[in-house]
Image (tube, grey):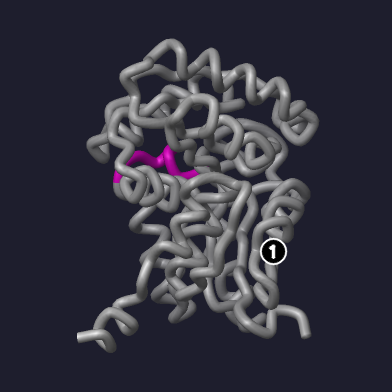
Amino acid sequence: MFGWRKRIGFISPTVIEVIPYDFYRFAPEGVGLVGVTCNIENWANDQYELALHNVERLAQYLASRNVDFIIHGGAPLVVSRGKGFDLEIISRIESLTGLPASTTVRAAMDGLAHLGIRKVVLASPFPEELNKQVAAFLESYGFSVLHSATLNVKFKELQNVAPSAIYRFAVEAAKAAPEADGLYMPCPQWPVADVVDILERDLHKPVVASDPADFWAAFRALGIRDRIAGYGRLLASLAEEVSPRETAGKR
């Protein structure tokens, strides 16, 4: 039966295409994805506001579909509001639904911290101004963005960026700040998950990407600690963790 183990709700700002493709390649058996979308059209504040206006309604709808965790996708929507809005939107979703939740940028920052990444290379497909907002948001929470780079991809062409191009772009970005602890590559709409593992091997540094980080946060909160290989250190770390219940049982 679909989602017999756990069901992850996802609120996407735009079409849901790369997200489920990634999810079902690394999600453990019995864990299902339940997605809804706001259908925004481009990188613009009025579009972000339109999507944010629908968050509460969509979160309640996902709760009615018996999901176990809710992810609010789309870093641009949150960083456009500045520091603290990630925590505010999580609180609103959790209060309305009684379910644990996260946002894309909060999951990423938790993932960066989990992997010990404080000095960051930011490599995104965003427009330059949006990239600056993401960098400022990270730095407001104490991360040091040593270098930021963007491919400046058109909004409706994100899914068409070749993994080979993403790989080359990330390698060049990493070279600009060799002292960085790791890379952050936001946006769930480009196929960056395809190259996370090989980037980590070649750069000898961890890479936090949107889809792996979003679902790492959900799996971790729900106690899913299956071995997930081939999609980076963050997802692989789930199998290395021991739950508080298991730790208490060993005392």
Of residues 245 and 229, the one nearer the viewer is 229
Q: Which residues are magenta?
A: 77-83
> Left or right: where does residue 133 sit relative to residue 76?
left
Quadrant for residue 197, please give it. top right
How far across and how far down the image is residue 75, in percent?
50, 42
- Looking at the image, which residue sits at the far left? 251
Query: How many labels were placed on the picture?
Result: 1
108 part of magenta stretch: no
Q: Is residue 186 left or right of residue 188?
A: left
Q: Which quarter of the rendering shows the C terminus?
A: bottom left
Q: Residue at x 53, y 61 (%)?
A: 71
Which residue: 35% across, 58% down?
Answer: 88
* Residue identified by numbered label 1: 35
Q: Is residue 37 above or below residue 133?
A: below
Residue 175 sits above or below residue 4 on the image:
above
- For the residue marked with disc 1, what is the amino acid? Gly
Image coordinates of residue 21 in percent, x first then y, are: 76, 52
- Residue 50 shows in the view: no
Residue at image point 54% right, 13% down:
172
SS at mark 1 in the image: strand
